[in-house]
Amino acid sequence: SQQGEEDPQALSIQEGENATMNCSYKTSINNLQWYRQNSGRGLVHLILIRSNEREKHSGRLRVTLDTSKKSSSLLITASRAADTASYFCATVPYSGAGSYQLTFGKGTKLSVIP
Amino acid sequence: NAGVTQTPKFQVLKTGQSMTLQCAQDMNHNSMYWYRQDPGMGLRLIYYSASEGTTDKGEVPNGYNVSRLNKREFSLRLESAAPSQTSVYFCASSDWAGNTEAFFGQGTRLTVV
């Protein structure tokens, strides 16, 4: 079964607004990664956050990780129409069987309206 | 820099036919993956290769086989295609399985009729 679950499934905002997407997962992780997919294209890596980190920034992106709640959030500030895409979280288990697997959730579809 | 290259980009198969999806990366990565993406299901891991010479099953391996031909190439074979295998297939690679970012190919859109 898929490890991560994103919430909401779909999000529609106005250009300039902030967008927040959440990811919950089930088992202990080594790290959690966020990816973007434009329609019909391959996925592009955004940020990797390790289990001992709580927050990371990259440009207009901010990712937080709460291992006690087994959840992460991705914040996109000052959104642009070009941010319209699907966003996926992916997790890598901490150890044991499958510890090399990169497992994706079902994604959040973000629409930014100009 | 080509990154991860998948061939073909599109394919239509008849039920029962076989085919091999090819994937090659030029980043000297150790690990490679095959995923399928279906509407509303996100990406599901079919098989992965943590390093050259090893392959392991993912979440949905039934009906597929893989070969890690060398460090660069990782192929996915459908021995007897079924309509349920209609999907978009993505190959990915990373420097070290699970510990670094993954780079994706552009996908193969497969239809089985």
Image (cartoon, rainbow, N blue to C red):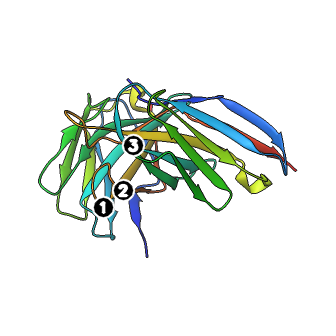
Label 3 Cα neighbours within 10 Å, binned few <14 / some 14-19 / many ≥20: some
Q: Chain of mark 2?
A: B
State which mark lies toward you, 1 or 3: 3
Residue at point 45% right, 48% down?
Answer: A53
| Dot 2: element | loop
Give amino acid for label 1: Asp
Find out whether the residues at labels 1 and 2 contact each other: C-beta distance under 8 Å: yes
Residue A68: horizontal and vertical position, in percent?
Answer: 45, 29
The residue wearing badge 1 is: B95
Q: Is residue B111 visible?
A: no
Foreground pick, A15 / B91: A15
Find out whether the residues at labels 1 and 3 contact each other: C-beta distance under 8 Å: no
> Relative to B51, does residue A88 appear above or below in the rendering?
above
Give amino acid for label 2: Thr
Q: Chain of mark 3?
A: A
Residue at point 63% right, 47% down?
Answer: A39
Q: State how far apart marks 1 and 3 are (Cα).
A: 19 Å
The residue wearing badge 3 is: A51
